[in-house]
Image (spheres, rainbow, N blue to C red):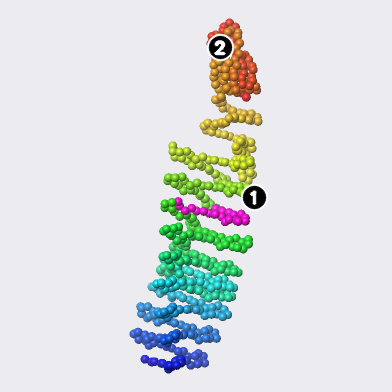
Amino acid sequence: AVSITAGESDTATGGGITLTTGVGATQAGAIGLTGAASAIGGGVTLTGGAGTTTAGGSVTLAAGTGQTTGGTVDVTAGTSTTTNAGGAITLTGGVGSALAGGEVTINSGAGTATSSGAITIATKNAGTNGVSGKLVFSSGTTSSGNSGALLIGTGAATGGAGGKIDIGVGSAALGAGGVVTVTAGSSRVFSSGTTSSGNSGALLVGTGAATQGTGGKIDIGVGSGSLGAGGVVTVTAGSSSNAAGGDATFKGGASSAGTGGKAEIFGGASSSAAGGEATLTGGASSANSVAGGAVTVTGGAGTGGTASQGGAISLTGGAGTAATGGSITINSGAGTASSSGAITIATKNAGSAGASGKLVFSSGTTSTGNSGSILLSTGTAGGSSGGNGGAITISVGGGTNGNTGGHLTLSAGGAATGAGTGGNIYLTPGNGQTAGGIYFRDDVASNTQYGTISATTFDFTASSSVSIVSSGTAALSGTVLTLTGSTGISMGASHVYNFESGTGTYDDGTLNKMAGTITTNTANLAADTPLTVTLTNSRVSATSQVFITMGAGCTGGTVQFVQLSNVGAGSFSAVFKNIDTANACTSAFSWHYLVIN
């Protein structure tokens, strides 16, 4: 062995050892410390001296300064020429027996006039039959205090954009892309330096790509709490005082042969309280006349050809196994000083060879109770200045090139045969100082009204003709029915029957019917003798038209109707005569009347 030892001192600093190479015209000489080759290669050890009362001696490896580029410091473990692993490199801070252990600090070089140096921590690409080496960033465990934090951040920028953070996993040519897992917990500090004029350094964390296997995954997790809350994970893009704030992007991995990776955000589950919320909120804006940040949810485009469909978007409330399922609420933003935001639900226009997507608003079915209702309503207009209530318009698309316009169907719910009553359809105009009506329009463009239904009117005077047609019986009923035709009322070629009618047997009596048949009490009207009868009838007025015809004649004589008299409010009189001068009647006779007002 060769030993070089400097002199000792009992009262001052011990002697030093300096190894200096010779100066050369082009390049100075190098110093090489190399262990000899053997079955086990010789080692090279640089150790600072122990401090018996204060700090131990330092070991410093520093490259020389240069006019163009400073010298480099290379630390490389030995290569294995067989099937064994290459040599490892270990950087370990000193043990502190009573206080904290020594720190390990890795700083890039400062750039006094330009950018500071980068720090790259990466494993080499794998060979043809292996996997690339993994990267582990972890603080140590603890038995009594808090475990060490893990901090990953970029430096603040006073004159440029804040440095971005990219966390990405490797893609895979044949297998699944790598997984990214973010779990709340503590962290260490990984940070690029700050800058006063340019961009701060970027911080990139990624795993290597795999050509035959699965890309490496990245797990970010914080500790759980047995008595307190679990650790929080916060991903925050950089802010800016003069330009746009940085973006935060969560993106599943792309795939050329399989399904693209999912990007999922879940609230935490709970076994004793409500599950955690998952909230997407656009950023607020305090600037005048500037909108707050939008929240956009868009299904992925299908660009592979005619059979490729766009990705769907599903909003589903949580299931309730013992109570009501979770609801879905869509509210537009409030306008504290102006209008609230609109809500638009619409399908996109169809392409050149398809149909536009349909809209379905439906409550679910039920096996025991009532199915859910659907309510469409506009808000009440209030305030000191007042306003009109919001309108509801339901319109169907028109047909072009000779095709039929879309139908509008209103169908109330049916009931099982013999088990209930079918649902009704109600059209109710609004109340007011003047009640609203129900209007029928020719078309929306001309706004021509050809019919009105209100509480007192069924008015179709704007139409040249109106038909009420029934394959069975069409009934009109009311306290008073008035039929008015400016040129007349036509019954067509129809059989008219079932007028109000009645019968009676008396000479003078009461029958409050529009038509009737009366049989006389007189059964022995003498020959050549008249008989005057009076009928009390509430249907008769002084202006009534009363028509009388004979019914069954008497036996023996011949009775004829002679005269109508005393037509007034509530009664009329009729004169009959046995015109047979020789024979008297031996039975009663009957007569008919019809009152027209």
Image quarter of residue 456:
top right
Q: Amino acid at mark 1?
A: Ser
Give percent across and percent down for residue 567.
64, 19
Residue interval drawn in magenta: 324-345
The dot on residue 384 is 1
Q: Amino acid at mark 2?
A: Thr
Q: Is residue 470 left or right of residue 88?
A: right
State the quadrant of the C terminus.
top right
417 drawn magenta: no
Give percent across and percent down for residue 434.
63, 40
Q: Nearer the viewer, residue 492 or 261?
A: 261
| Magenta stretch: dominant secondary structure | loop
Asked if residue 522 is positioned above or below residue 255 in the image, the reply reads: above
Which residue corresponds to mark 2?
A: 522
Give percent across and percent down for residue 140.
42, 73
CB under 8 Å between discs 1 and 2: no
Image quarter of residue 17:
bottom left
Element assignment for label 2: loop
344 drawn magenta: yes
Q: Nearer the viewer, residue 74 or 436?
A: 436
Q: Earlier in the sequence, mark 1 or mark 2?
A: 1
Q: Is residue 457 visible?
A: yes
Element assignment for label 1: loop
Q: Is residue 349 visible?
A: no
* Mark toward the viewer: 1 or 2: 1
Whole-number angstrom distance, CA of label 1 to CA of label 2: 81 Å
Q: Is residue 299 left or right of residue 34?
A: right
Asked if residue 589 is positioned above or below residue 374 in the image, the reply reads: above
Q: In the image, what residue occupies the spot 53% across and 60% down?
A: 281
